[in-house]
Amino acid sequence: MENNTYPANPSGTFVHAPVATDLRSFLSNVFTYMAVALILSGVVAWWFANDASLLQYLVNFETGKQTILGWVVLFAPLGLVLLMGAMLERLSATALLAVYVVYSIVTGMSLSFIFLAYTASSITNVFFFSAAVFAVMAVAGYTTKTDLTKLGNILMIGLIGIVIASLINMFLGSSTMDYIISIIGVVVFTGLTAYDMQKLKVMGSSIPAGTEQARKMALMGALNLYLDFINLFLMLLRLFGSRRD
């Protein structure tokens, strides 16, 4: 779970949109990239979950444990997110898009595991519920006049805490701790959705449409919103998803 992969506004202040069409174009690209990533991840996750010949590369059916490739797939998305953030200035927009597509596909492979743990109906229900919550918070972040910077800093601390607690719980295997992490996670990623949306509104107001930098920032913005949505979905699935018998 990562967030804040795009750089902060250099001036540290809010900039009012000089050209409204630039902002609309920027946000349109952001949500297009995000939609593409969600579709790719969803299709790949469903494909792997329903094809035993593919799933066997990720899970050992005899032991029920993940294979080496399964562990690689599980942690590879984090590495790709870090790569996109670290190489942002060096990679062209086309190269960054290629990494983004690979990230979406690999994330889809890792998400195939949820089909083994939860019923398809509960996954569908939680997905649409997550989409509704995400949409409400995105609109709230776009329309609010309140500067969410301080809230964002607090949420980032909470995010770091979730990551650390999740890693610890991988070894402890505590269901109670998992439940607490999920509740906190819902709060954090709900808030981050509004925070990231506000940052994107500011960013889109200060970047001329059609430039290489605008494409890069749109991709990184899409990545942030994608991460907010996926993590919100997974946290809600842990809380409300119906597990398979």
Image (spheres, helix red, strand yellow):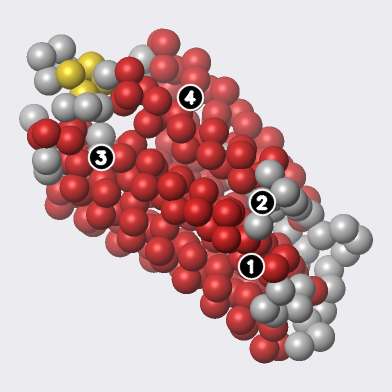
Disc 2 target residue = 91
Q: CA distance from mark 1 to mark 2?
A: 12 Å
Disc 4 target residue = 166
Disc 2, disc 3: CB below 8 Å? Answer: no
Q: Position of residue 38 (x, y in %)?
A: 38, 58
Q: Identify which residue, 125 or 103, lies in the foreground.
A: 103
Q: Is there any visible trace of residue 155 in the rendered image?
A: no
Q: Sort mark 3 into few (<14), some (14-19) or many (20+) by Cα contacts within 10 Å.
A: many
Disc 1 target residue = 215
Q: The disc labelled 4 sits on which kind of residue?
A: Ser
Q: The disc labelled 1 sits on which kind of residue?
A: Arg
Question: In the image, 225: left or right of 68?
Answer: right
- Which residue: 53% across, 57% down? 97
Q: CA distance from mark 2 to mark 3?
A: 30 Å
**For marks 1 and 4 on the same chain, the one whose residue lies earlier in the sequence:** 4
- Which residue: 78% across, 54% down? 8
Disc 3 target residue = 112
